[in-house]
């Protein structure tokens, strides 16, 4: 029997959990759905990630308003994928911050990514008609962007760690509280999506940079919050292992189809039951195969190309 396309059959609601990570630091997790967060400044909020639609974002903001009524001054986007950015209009943020490469990717392939992700993960797009259009950052940076939180709360540091999940991923670091919002550069008990990735950079220097912060609490892109130094190390280690196994197995294959079979066989015992594993793997291996054969930048995913790759590898 053919597998349903991507996450098109995953229509059940996930239980959301709002966690207070430290005074004025919040994360919303949802059983493998995209995570979001917020950090209180003295008289404003910094929100991290925007979800897929304004309706979905407003539901998150309603939960957040049970804890704080401060206005959103900054909305930080970790990267360009539609499920992370298209709900931005709900926040009313004064400034939308992203890495400069994220802005370039939105311009280059934002429309195609929107159509692709909507077809792959329709459940995440609550009331898609509420999306006013592509989300455009109003402030970008190349290496580091620092937000003074005021009132003795210290700084929030937005840092580029190198190419990884995309060309333009950033992390948000709270050194005073040792909390790191890592976006999709790290997943905790959730499978990786690498369809727009730079696997070799990500598995080495980029994750080394992420680990160098010495975080004691880490919010990944999906999955549970990692707590304690050991928990953070385990989340980073799982992410690195997933990439390392992919590189090893695909690198030993003689065809894309063989690369998929080898990679699936090697990863499934440990990761096969984790959220979005089956959904992601065909797109992951297709991108890795390109990378290993000299295609430096990821090709643009379209709804049509998604179906072609899925039918070739997962049917």
Image (spheres, helix red, strand yellow):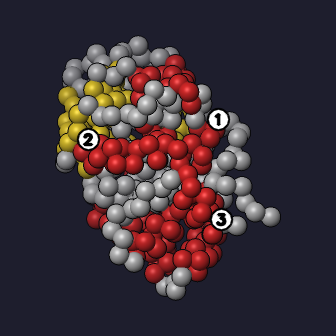
On screen, residue 284 versus residue 182, left or right, reads right
Q: Which residue lies at the image location 47% right of the left edge and 60% below the top edge?
A: 195
Classify the position of the C terminus by image quarter: bottom right
Q: Which class describes the residues within 10 Å of circle 2: few (<14), some (14-19), or many (20+)?
A: many
Q: Which residue lies at the image location 39% right of the left edge and 62% below the top edge?
A: 298
C-alpha distance separating marks 2 and 3: 39 Å
Q: Are marks 2 and 3 in contact (CB under 8 Å)?
A: no
51 to 290, vertically: above or below: above
Residue occupied by mark 3: 311
SS of the residue under disc 3: helix
Classify the position of the N terminus by image quarter: bottom right
Residue occupied by mark 1: 15
Give whichever of 42, 165 is nearer the camera. 165
C-alpha distance separating marks 1 and 2: 29 Å
**Residue occupying the far right of the picture:** 1
Task: Give residue 93's position: percent from left, percent from top.
Answer: 33, 22
Task: Give residue 92's position: percent from left, percent from top.
Answer: 37, 19
Task: Give residue 17's position: percent from left, percent from top.
Answer: 57, 33
Label located before the other in sequence (2 or 3): 2
Give whichever of 101, 134 is nearer the camera. 134
């Amino acid at each position: 029997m053919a597998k349903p396309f991507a996450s098109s059959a995953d229509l059940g609601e996930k239980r959301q959990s709002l966690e207070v990570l430290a005074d004025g630091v919040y994360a919303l997790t949802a059983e493998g759905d995209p995570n979001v967060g917020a950090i209180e400044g003295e008289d404003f909020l910094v929100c991290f990630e925007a979800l897929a639609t304004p309706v979905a974002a407003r539901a998150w903001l309603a939960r957040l308003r049970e804890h704080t009524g401060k206005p959103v001054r900054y909305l930080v986007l970790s990267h360009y994928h539609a499920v992370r950015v298209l709900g931005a209009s709900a926040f009313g943020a004064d400034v939308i911050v992203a890495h400069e490469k994220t802005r370039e990717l939105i311009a280059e392939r934002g429309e195609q990514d929107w159509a692709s992700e909507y077809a792959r993960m329709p459940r995440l797009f609550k009331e898609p008609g509420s999306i006013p259009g592509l989300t455009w950052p109003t402030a970008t940076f190349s290496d580091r962007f620092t937000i003074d939180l005021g009132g003795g709360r210290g700084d929030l540091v937005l840092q580029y760690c190198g190419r990884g999940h995309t060309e333009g991923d950033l992390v948000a670091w709270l050194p005073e509280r040792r909390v790191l919002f890592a976006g999709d550069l790290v997943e905790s008990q959730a499978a990786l999506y690498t369809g727009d990735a730079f696997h070799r950079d990500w598995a080495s220097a980029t994750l080394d940079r992420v680990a160098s912060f010495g975080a004691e609490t880490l919010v990944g892109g999906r999955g549970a919050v990692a707590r304690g130094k050991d928990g953070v190390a385990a989340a980073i280690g799982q992410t690195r292992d997933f990439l390392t196994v992919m590189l090893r197995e695909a690198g030993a294959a003689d065809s894309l189809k063989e690369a998929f079979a080898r990679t699936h066989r090697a990863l499934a015992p440990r990761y096969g039951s984790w959220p979005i594993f089956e959904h992601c793997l065909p797109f992951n291996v297709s991108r890795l195969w390109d990378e290993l054969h000299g295609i430096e930048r990821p090709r643009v995913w379209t709804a049509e190309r998604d179906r072609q790759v899925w039918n070739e590898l997962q049917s």
